[in-house]
Image (tube, rainbow, N blue to C red):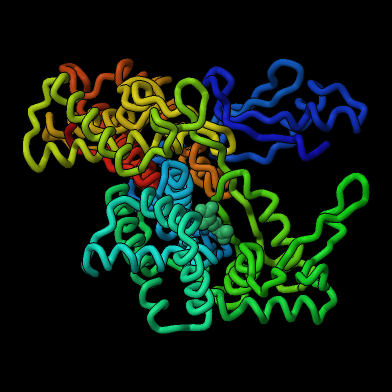
Amino acid sequence: MLQNLRIDRSKDKAHGDFATNAALMLAKPLHQNPRELAAQIIAHLPPSDKIAKVEIAGPGFINFFVNQADTAQGLMDMLADAHLGIKPPEHPETVVIDYSAPNVAKEMAVHHLRSTVIGDAVVRILEFTGHKVIRANHIGDWGTQFGMLIAYLERMENQQGSGMVLKDFENFYTEAKKCYDEDPDFAVKARRYVVMLQSGDAYCHEMWQKLVKMTMDQNYALYKRLDVTLTEKDTMGESMYNDMLPVIVKELADKGLAVRDDGAMVVFLDEFKNKEGETAGVIVQKKDGGFLYTTTDLACLKYRIETLHADRIIYFTDSRQARHMQEVWAIARKDGFLTDKVKVEHAPFGMMLNKDGKPFKTRDGKTVKLRDLLDEAESRVDKMLTERGSSFTGEARAQVVHNIAIGAVKYADLSKNRQTDYIFDWDSMLSFEGNTAPYLQYAYSRIRAIFRKTELTGGQIVLTEEAEQELASKLLAFSEAVSQAAVKAMPHLLCTYLYELSGIFMRFYEACPVLKQGVPEETARSRLSLCDLTAKVLSNGLGMLGINVMEQM
Ligand code: ARG
């Protein structure tokens, strides 16, 4: 029951700055009237300079009104701090973030966008809050399909020469599959090539590397275009764990956890029992000796714990992989290398849907390529700028188009609770109104414009007007919003905060003139400091989401 005891920031200034339901929660076990209990609590509060007034409200809430001078000082401190009041953690953690993870010889599709964009935001948030982050791009670069892919690459090179550039992986994969299904000679060769690749044959290895490089070169270019921080050094693909796989299976067998079942090595755990008491069993090695996605993830987890010394590991994959994750962790716990000292978290996300609520596909039912999506975003923004009479040209215009387009696409994804499916809709994400990137970017630019109109600079903050106090209280809540987003690996909490902050700022700006004639210089400079701090919070907040701001747009 006491876990329901809360202290919250008040939504409405009339109810003070903070409120607690402590008296309501304690009244029952203490057999007391909540309002009387609230009065007693208030009577026993230690004196504090930070609190100006305490009141009982409603059935027994206690409302706290903070001392505005103290709040003002808090804002001045925040303004002077590059981390805007976000204190370094008492126990900095090493956090491995598993995200993006596209597959080799396949186009990075729209659903990879979610993992990439959400994962990268959480990376930036955790780094900003002072944790050590290790980016892990667990690319799918191993498996039986590589025999077929190598055989097909060989065929293509014979036709087009070895310097060929691959533009269309979607076709490459389907064509390779077609040859495999329809051409028996090709299939024989493909099967031979897998075996050769696995036993370290130089030619197959070189061909395989070419496939990996061709795919990843395009992906790195996409990351750059998306302002995503992943680079080559973050790629830790499935193939990296090959040598560990037989060791893992042997260890599981030695411990009696994996048993031979119909030729395969299988782990049966009570955790996997269904209601009827049957356990499905998880295969860790196939009859033919091949290893599986689960085996690789076991090795990978062990590596992250024992070699990277992770304290926390977050996997950004779609919600359909939830069971897979549970199986890997259960086996790792039984084996013993995963203990309660390490936090493992699956940060699942839903699907991206089109306006009709159907999975996001091209008109002919193909998966939408990320590249095409970004091209479209940019051309829409370019048109929009023309309609708005933008005076930007050349390089500067291209940069503004990039910032708005990429920002809008990323923010549309980031601003929704990642656990739910989300609807991809151009018109709403590119709108300058509502909870969108263009709205927030524009709010930032408008504040920066104020500073171009005056010689005055920010000064000591004094909070007198209610709109000032409301803005102040929201600004001070920045570190809480960031920390919540970090703890829950949920960037939308930061988005919501920034959106609310912008709204509160607009109200302040309407109610409290800054540069108007007749405003005393002291007041103007106090308000300029509030503007400055709001702009800093917006740019740092958007920065943590991987979204650029502009002085003018
Ligand atoms: N490559 C996988 C996919 O495209 C995602 C990998 C996620 N990470 C992991 N450790 N399993 O679905």
Q: Depth check: give the residue in front, 81 or 314.
A: 314
- Residue at horizontal 52%, vertical 23%? 357
Q: Is residue 190 above or below residue 75?
A: below
- Across and down, in percent, residue 449 comes to 17, 30
- Residue at horizontal 40%, vertical 58%? 105
Q: Is residue 520 left or right of residue 322?
A: left
- Across and down, in percent, residue 200 comes to 48, 83
- Across and down, in percent, residue 18 comes to 59, 30
- Residue at horizontal 47%, vertical 55%? 182
> Can the viewer see residue 280 in this picture?
yes
Quadrant in which ligand 1 is drawn: bottom right
- Residue at horizontal 91%, vertical 32%? 30
Q: Is residue 139 above or below residue 320?
A: below
Q: Depth check: give the residue in front, 541 or 342.
A: 342
Q: Is residue 324 left or right of residue 230?
A: right
> Can the viewer see residue 92 in this picture?
no
